[in-house]
Amino acid sequence: MEIIEIQNEIVDEFNMFDSWMEKYEYLIDLGKNIPKISNENKTDDNIIKGCQSKVWLHATEDNGKVNFFADSDAIITKGIISLLIRTFSGQKPQDIIESNLDFIDKIGLRQHLSPNRANGLNNMIKKIKFYAIGFNKKINE
Amino acid sequence: MKDFELIRKDFPILEAKVNGHHLIYLDNAATSQTPNCVIDSISDYYKNLNSNIHRGVHFLSQKATEKYENTRKKFKDHLNANSTKEIIFTSGTTHSINLIANGFINSLKPGDEIIVSQLEHHSNIVPWQMLSEKTGAKMKVIPMNNLGELDIKIYEKLLSNKTKVVFVNHVSNALGTVNPIKKIIEKAHRYDAKVLIDGAQAVPHFHVDVTELDVDFYVCSAHKFCGPTGVGILYGKQRILEELPPYQGGGEMIDEVTFEKTTYADLPNKFEPGTPNIAGVIASGVALDYINDIGLDNIKKYEDKLLAYATKKLKEINGVKIYGESENKTSVISFNIGDIHPYDIGSVIDNMGVAVRTGHHCAQPIMDYFKIPGTIRISFCFYNNFEEIDILIDSLKKAVRMLS
């Protein structure tokens, strides 16, 4: 599936819930099934700065596609990254770089994050794009 | 005595709805809410008084100056300072601490020592750390115990003739511990060291007498006691303030200016360059009158009851661990539930309209001591009530069910 299709799918899923409590419950469930980063990759270098909770993100490249792995000590944060991973894992670096992430606003997630938490989210997206840029360079070399 | 239920009506924001729920505001240690009289004072200032103080000969300027200076007198009386020259208005506690730390920049040298406590807010650590880096003076730390209390025996050992400044908070913002500052000040003075007390979390909750404490500097912020943001009150002993160099240059802090040399104004103007936050300062005086009208003794008694009730109720929730269990604390409770991240709980109960603080509360050394990423902190003001505590407890229970 293309990035845009996955995003639309996420928006549809979240639209099924009436309240933010239900959306949170869903996020919590998603967090439990996150593609887990291995312990050896839980390094300081892989910590995303600017989050209230600790967030680690690691990526690998396989046949021109990027796979992401993450973890966090906060379960809601884990749910949020797992949405990002679902959107970007298995995609080509070039597609990740060119993508526009609009599901976050469409599901109303951003308005539920205080500015410093939204900052953490922006840093997660930035880190994902940095990985993509790195892999893209490697592939084109 | 005022009825504490009626007091709620003075605070329009308490009527607010958050995410479809009534706001339960339990983040008062970060900032307290503002009563109508304070809001009206700000509006009244801009409608009827707005002008620059200390400068104009005209009616408005004189009127505004009178109110501004009268506010200084209110704080002088409230803190029991000796003179209005000892009361400086700043933009807040952080500004006040920086002003004083900067004052020691020329007098400290390598070999000197400054003492801080492990319980400090970052704003009472970083300015001194910067000073330490600039001057070569060494920073020593008073440790705390499991209850969140400072170890005074070790403090005594840290003190020596090398000690020049000691800076400790009166009440810990993260744990609520009330520190034995009288003892701390007295012991520092034996070595001729100066003491700065950060009273940001004390002044809203009980009476402070700077003369009785014999403290050298005492600082606090108006927005913690129902005043507006952007106003700090700095008390300093006149003799010491006179010796300290000015922090910032500008208008109003001068005596004479030529391009060769400027001589500085007397206290307190020496430390108040430029146009101050006139409306804010005047409104802070109104806030002070407001809390004095309720009475700090009544406030303390009522808040102690809230603290005891909330502590008891919280402990009934499985897995609750409270950080900071000193016998002597203000109405602040820092806690975690099981191994659930404080951020998760904070996010979920925010959706139920309950406002708490989560994180390290700008006091990372305390979190490092307990080896935790942060806590959930609830902090009361006199307008909070027992029903709100019940709603908090219910919300916490729901959050725990969702998150475990």
Image (cartoon, helix red, strand yellow):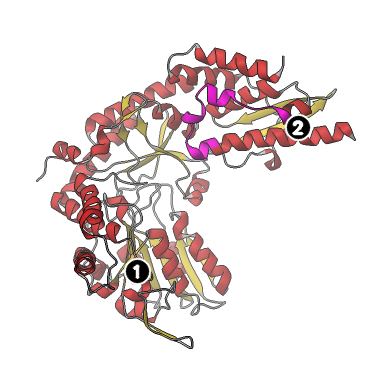
- Residue at the image position 63 percent from the left and 29 percent from the top: A71
Q: What stretch is highlighted in magenta?
A: A97-118
Label 2, secondary structure: give it: helix
Q: Does the magenta stretch include residue A116?
A: yes
Q: Which amino acid does label 2 sit on?
A: Ala
- The residue closer to the viewer here, B70 or B107, is B70
Q: Evaluate whether label 2 is on the same chain as label 1.
A: no
Label 1, secondary structure: give it: strand
Where residue B146 sits: x, y (%)?
43, 47
Residue B354 visible in the current orientation: yes
- The residue closer to the viewer here, B85 or B147, is B85
Give the residue pinned by disc 2.
A132
Badge 2, how many Cα within 10 Å: few under 14, some, many 20+?
A: many
User: Which label belongs to residue B217?
Assistant: 1
Residue A35 visible in the current orientation: no
Where residue B71 sits: x, y (%)?
22, 64
Residue projecting furthest to the front: B58
- Residue at the image position 68 percent from the left and 36 percent from the top: A127
